[in-house]
Image: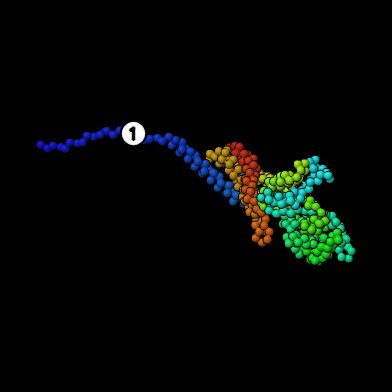
Amino acid sequence: MVTTPSQPPVKHIREHPPRRFRGGTRSFQRTLASAKRTMMFSEIVKLAIDSFNTSRVRFALTALGMVIGSASLILVFTIGLTGKQYILNEIQSIGTNMVELEYEGGGTGAINANRNDFLTREDERAIDEQVPSVALSSPMLEMHDRVTFPGGVAKDVLVLGVTPQYQQVRNLIVLSGRFFDDADETAHTKVADVTETFAREMFGSPEAAINQTFQLSGMPFTIIGTFKESVDTFGQSEINDETILIPYSVGRYFTGTDAVKQIFFSIRDQGDVEEAANEIVHVAHSRHLSSSVYKASTLTALLTTASQIANALTVVLLLVAAVTLAVGGVGIMNIMLATVRSRIREIGIRKALGATAREIKLQFLTEAVFISLSGGIVGVLIGLALPISVRIFTAYTLPVSPLSVIIALLTSTAVGVIFGTLPANRAARMDPVESLKYE
């Protein structure tokens, strides 16, 4: 008898349907839509390039307005920044870190001869000690007197008694000889420095004035140097064309008092000038009558005003450059309208094959942006070429603002969008049937 081996029991396996992930269908649809948009956009870009290659000369001439406008915008920015920097440098040469402390009178602002509360040398020393940001200082005595030169020549001049630090505080440029130093101040040496204009008028040249002598109230002085201001203030500062500087210690002999007209301070950091000015006034008030008025003048407000004026002028010039861009935009609009008219049958065929009005609009808008942006890029390169060439071939450095490049490219794109919208809308609204019939 033959026996067959027993078969193991068969287990019934329950089949499960495939799992469906939430959001899978939506994600796939979004990916597919994104791919379609990318393909559509790439196709539109290819059509725009083909259209450009078909009529290169026409499109190049159309983009010429954008080239000129963008280059003008870059150059206007460069000119504006150069002018602004020049103005600020000129003002800074006077001494942007300088604070000028002056006594203005009593509590009502009017100087009362019976209650004059002038500044003193002790005020200067107290401020130097109590205001840490002060680097240098110099008092100033002012005298109007007649000086006599050998041969009996007399002249009315302005004589200022200052310390050696006055040269650094006021950024004075010594043209010949030297400026009197601390040794001259301590020894009460009868020496003087005169302005360039004064030296030329009296002796013919700054060099010829060195070692010449004159008498001030019968006291002999020797000229040891000539100087000028870093920037000509045209007599608006305490120095005029005919000014003589003598050591402060010697000037006290003529005034007979410790009172000074002004005290000049140089601040270590330009950012601390305004705060230091307030501290200087506070220290001066603490040492004098409560009704006395003291004023600390700085060039910070002047710098701010000059910067605002320069920025305003730059904006005006930019508006002029914007007119050039607008003219270029009108040229783009005209050429795109002509392009739409010449491609009516093409538009009809594309619509008959399934192209939507949105796709047609985007195609012609892309072509307009392509023309304006390509012109803008070329204009930016031309605009940057000039200041870079000046840097390479000359000793001058013209500032270039990256912001101007960004503005030029964004403006070029905006011009293409704005002036290309009308032709694009006209193409998108065309009837495909009527377009196919067009001859």
State the residue at coordinates (60%, 43%): 365
| In the image: residue 61, left or right of residue 246 | left
| In the image: residue 11, left or right of residue 222 | left
The residue lying toward the viewer, choosing from 293 and 395, is: 293
State the residue at coordinates (67%, 55%): 398
Residue where numbered disc 1 is placed = 16
State the residue at coordinates (87%, 59%): 155
Residue furthest right in the image: 152
Image quadrant where one finds the N terminus: top left
* Coordinates of residue 405 in the picture (x, y in percent): 63, 50
* Coordinates of residue 280 in the picture (x, y in percent): 71, 47
State the residue at coordinates (72%, 44%): 286
Q: Residue 121, can we see it?
A: yes
* Residue type, numbered disc 1: His
What colouring method underlies this structural image?
A: rainbow
Q: Quadrant of residue 213?
A: bottom right
The residue lying toward the viewer, choosing from 217 and 342, is: 217
* Location of residue 397 with respect to 304 vertically, above or below: below
* Coordinates of residue 119 in the picture (x, y in percent): 77, 49
Residue furthest left in the image: 1
* Coordinates of residue 408 in the picture (x, y in percent): 64, 48
- Which secondary structure lies at badge 1? loop
The residue lying toward the viewer, choosing from 332 and 174, is: 174
Image quadrant where one finds the C terminus: top right
Task: Tell me the crowding category of disc 1: few under 14, some 14 to 19, or many 20 or more residues within 10 angstroms, Cα based.
Answer: few
